[in-house]
Every structure is written in C-alpha cells, then in structure tokens.
Amino acid sequence: MKTPKPHSTVFVRGIAALCALGVLATAPAALAAAGGVRADASVEFKRQFGAAFFDQYWHLHADTAISVGYYKVARVLMIPDDKARAAKLRFLRTSLAKLQKITPATLDPETRTDRAVLENQLAGEIWYLTDFRDWQWDPSLYNVAEPFALLLNTDYAPLEVRLRDVLERLSNVPAYYAAAKSSVKNPTREHTQLAIEQNSGTLEVFGPELEQQIAGSTLTPRERALLTQRIAAARTAIADYISWLKAQDQALASGTARSFRIGRDLYEPKFAFDIASGSTAEALYERARQEKERLLTRMDLLSDELWPKYFPNAPRPNDRLDKIGTLIGKMSEQHIARGDLFKEVSRTIPELEQWITDHNLVTLDPEKPLQIRITPKYKQGIAGASIDAPGPYDANARTYFNVTPLDDLSAERAESSLREYNRWMLPILVIHEAVPGHYVQLVYSNKSPSLIKSLFGNGAMVEGWAVYGERMMLESGYGGDTAEQWLMYSKWNLRSVCNTILDYSIHVLGMSEADAKKLLTREAFQSEEEVREKWRRLTLTSVQLTSYFAGYSAIYDFRERLKKEEAGHFDLKLFHEKFLSYGSAPVRVIEDMMTGGGS
C-alpha cells in the first residue's frame, strides 16, 4: 500500500539529473570568471520565467494545471494528437533555448537552483516526448477522470461556475478519446489492461453523484440539458475506448505485445531525469544490494533476541532466512480486523501528530485539512494507498489520503494483506503517507518561496522524505523502541531496498517473474498479496520504485554528515524545517542550498 508515483502536486515525470547538464552548483572560480553574481541577471530570469511563462505552460499542460490549483485553464481539455504534441515540443524547445542563454554563474543561489530545476524539467519533458514516447505504448495515459473529479470536488468557485467549467471541458471528450486511439501504437498488454480497469472507473465520475450536483444547482434549463447531453456523449466515448482496448487486449494475447521492460538504453536516462541524484541506476542498484545484506544481518540479530519470546519451546532454524521469516510470520498474526482499516488509520493520524509535537520534531500546520477516502476507482490498480495533495496555487484545498478497501478480496487474500500491515507495520504506512511523510512534506512544499521548486517536484526527494520520516519517528522512540518494532521496520525498509533491486533487475537485467517473486517472499519476507501487487506494479512502472531508496539514503547521509560537522549543536527540528523549506527540489539541490555550496 504505497504511493505509485509522485503525487498529484508533483509534476508529471520528475527532473533530469542536475549534474548531467552541469548546472547543479557553480564553483567560486567559475563565478569570478563570469564576473560574479549580478542582481539584474536574477531579475531577468524571473521576468522571463515568471507569470507569463507559466500562463503559456499551463495552457499546454491543462490537466496538471488543475491538479496544482491553476484554474484559469479549467475549461481547457487538450486533444492528445500530433498537433498538440508538436505545439508542446515547440514551446519546450523555445523555452529551453531562452533559459540556456542565462549563465548560471551570474545568478544568486536561489535563482541559480531554480534555473537548474527548470532546465531539467524542460529537457526531461522533451526526452519523454521524443525518446521515451510512452504516449504511443501506454494507453492508461489517456484518462479524463482526475481533472473532472477535481473540478467537481474542489471548492475553488461556486458550484454553478464549476459545472460550467465542466460543461466546456466535456465538449472535447469524444475528440480526446478518438485521438487516444490514433496515438496508441504497439501497446504493452499490461498497460492496456490497466487502461481498461481505470477508464471503467472513470465512468463513475460522470455518474449519479454528478447528476445530484446538477439537480441541486441553479443552472438554467438550457445548461442542464446541454450538460446531460455532453455527459452522455462523454460516457459513450469512454465506453467506446474501453471496447477498443478490450479488442486490443485480445489481439495482444497472442504474444505480439511490446514488452513492459524498457531496457537499459531507456532506463539509465529515465533514471537520470526522474531521480536526479547525480549517480547512475547501476550504482544505486549495487548500493541497494549491499544495504540488503546489512539489513538482513540486523534482522538476524533481532530474531535471535526475540525467538525465545515467540517460540519458547522450539529450536531456532539454522538458516537465517527461515528464522527471520518464521518469526515475522508469527508476529504478523497480530493485526486489525478486516473492517477496521479506515477506523485505525483515522485513529493513528492524531496520535502521530501529538507525538511529533511532544518530541519537537517538526512544526505542523493545523490549518491544512487531511481527508481519508476510498481510493477512486479510476486511480485503483497500482497501489493500495496514496496521497493526493493540492498544489501551491490552491494550497488550502483538501489533501486526500486514499485507502483502497479490502472489500473485493477473498478472505484468504484479505488476510494476507492484513498480515502484511500488522500492528507494527500499519502505523509505518500512515507515517509514510501522512505524518510526517507525504502530507507534511507537501504542505511545506506549497509554502516554499520558489514556485518552480514546488511545482516541478523531484520524486526521489518526495518519496525519500517519507521513508526518512519512518526512521526518524522510530529513532525518536515511537513504537516503544522495542525489538519487535525495529524488526518490522527493518522488513519495511528492506522493501524500499528491494524495490530498487527488483526494478533494475526486471527492466534492465531481464529478471523473470518467478525469480522476482522468490526474492520478495524468501529474502524480503513479503506476503503473497503484497507480492502479487508488487509484481503488477513492476510491470506498470519503471524507475519510480527506485526513488524510495535513492531519496532516503541521500537524505539520511546528508543528515548524518551534518550531525558530525555540527557536533554538540545540531538541531534536528531546525534541520527538518530548513530541509523542507526548499519545496520538492532534488536532495542535491537542497543540500547545496543548506550548506552554502551554491553561494
């Protein structure tokens, strides 16, 4: 039950590796050679890439604009055809050329890092359109649900205004799905099936709840009639796309489908754009393998300590994996009832908030609402829990904690999931998704003075902070500092490490499904239900699963280095709040800003 991707406030793909373009930091010698920092250069950057730039940008990215609270384009639904992609490419290339004329060394540190983030965002989008080209082989990219749902459920304007925005957007839905069918060439079967599942959920957005909103509004009879007509046309277009996808899926069943494995030639540049660590995917993979061994050694010692408590009359297995797995299996019997998931998550959040305040870990904002909800059908199919947070343009809108219920699972599969999220693990999940994880980080990100760093968020920083938050909470004593809690946390942390190993192994090294599942069950002690979900996620995403370990290890290494350098006066709360103040920038950028490397 992890977030499948950077959250809705975090822009589409992540950011390119900053060092790859040579713009992460500028040495003093380079500054001197360029004549030093000039105030007029920073002003010029902000003029060229300020409000007017974003007005153009959001008109070409209207769906994402709505997700970050930029409602000026609420009525715009871009038709995803060759013409739209060409227009986007022209804008991106023109903007990148203008940006590259501004010398980094002449900018103040804050603006220089803004320039780096923006350069990589623009370059990354160009690469996705021209090289990765998932718009051809991933049919699940075409789905109108999310922006419509946000417009209908976010109180950015009176209901009648929002319904009129929806009315205008609806007019393009049939053309949208017609363009989707024309764009898709040689899709993967996995993404085709996901598109069927999620677009089937999209029909719910245009169902009874919308009809009730229309009935309770003060729209004119003509507007109501036109809405009803366009809703029907939209539903027909969605149903037609689903039927078309089902036909595609049947044709692909013969084994002619494109492989979901993206291969080394695409994986390494995608890793550079998405993770922005300054390292390579292969290097992170090797580090993850070493970390897996360290964790297993730690878990072996904890298992020796706990074995007599849980198996007082049974000998310990000689094989450490058997021993750890047997002990975790026994402990996992302690879990909530199937119907108590929402109740337990709701109970845990205020408990975590109180702990953070009492232990002076980070300042929380009580004014930002968090709402727990069932994951909408159009978002299901990749992960069991996620956060949807508002963007900086509408920072006071609701944040949703999406939890997928176990209602549709058999008793056996539900029990497997509950054992995975047992009494020790479920709180860690809530820490990761909410407090002090994604929810808190994204609240801080929206307050950053840098709009660029808030909007163009780095997935490794976002996921890394959530993973770091888990460890930070346990270090503060949450969970009782027991051997049980640390053993289960180690299993959870092992998941992040194995995510990296598996993602690289599957997409680059060609690991089989059988070997992947063996690693998950045998060496990562995952339940059958978790393994089933993880394999599916591995076939639907690439690189994203490496962001957890990449970001966490970078943040933790940075903190530990500062603790040594500031021995005796290191302030943990100050570190957290300063780190979070830079939006969702890559960890390397934040480290550069905090330590003065960019000054």
Image: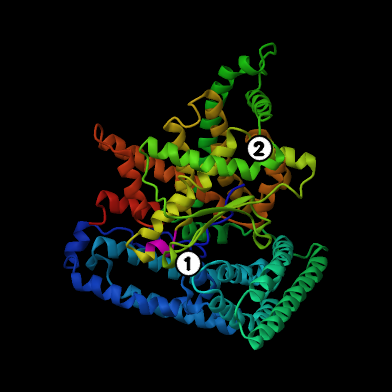
Label 2: element kind: helix
Answer with left or right where residue 88 lies relative to residue 220. Answer: left
Q: Nearer the viewer, residue 224 or 571?
A: 224
Q: Nearer the viewer, residue 83 or 252?
A: 83
Give how far across and how far down residue 257 sits, in percent: 75, 64
Q: Are marks 2 and 1 in contact (CB under 8 Å)?
A: no
Q: Callout 2: few (<14), some (14-19), or many (20+) C-alpha neighbours within 10 Å?
A: many
- Rendering quarter of residue 418: top right
- Extent of the magenta region: 453-457
Is residue 388 part of the magenta span, yes or no? Answer: no
Q: Residue at x 50, y 78 (%)?
A: 73
Q: Amino acid at mark 2?
A: Glu
Q: Nearer the viewer, residue 221 or 512?
A: 221
Q: Residue at x 29, y 77 (%)?
A: 47
Give the residue pinned by disc 1.
Answer: 68
Question: Residue 381, can we see it?
Answer: yes
Q: Nearer the viewer, mark 2 or mark 1?
A: 1
Give the residue pinned by disc 2.
Answer: 420
Give how far across and how far down residue 100 sits, in percent: 34, 73
Q: Residue at x 64, y 52 (%)?
A: 383
Is residue 454 part of the magenta span, yes or no? Answer: yes
Give how far across and how far down residue 96 sits, in percent: 39, 75
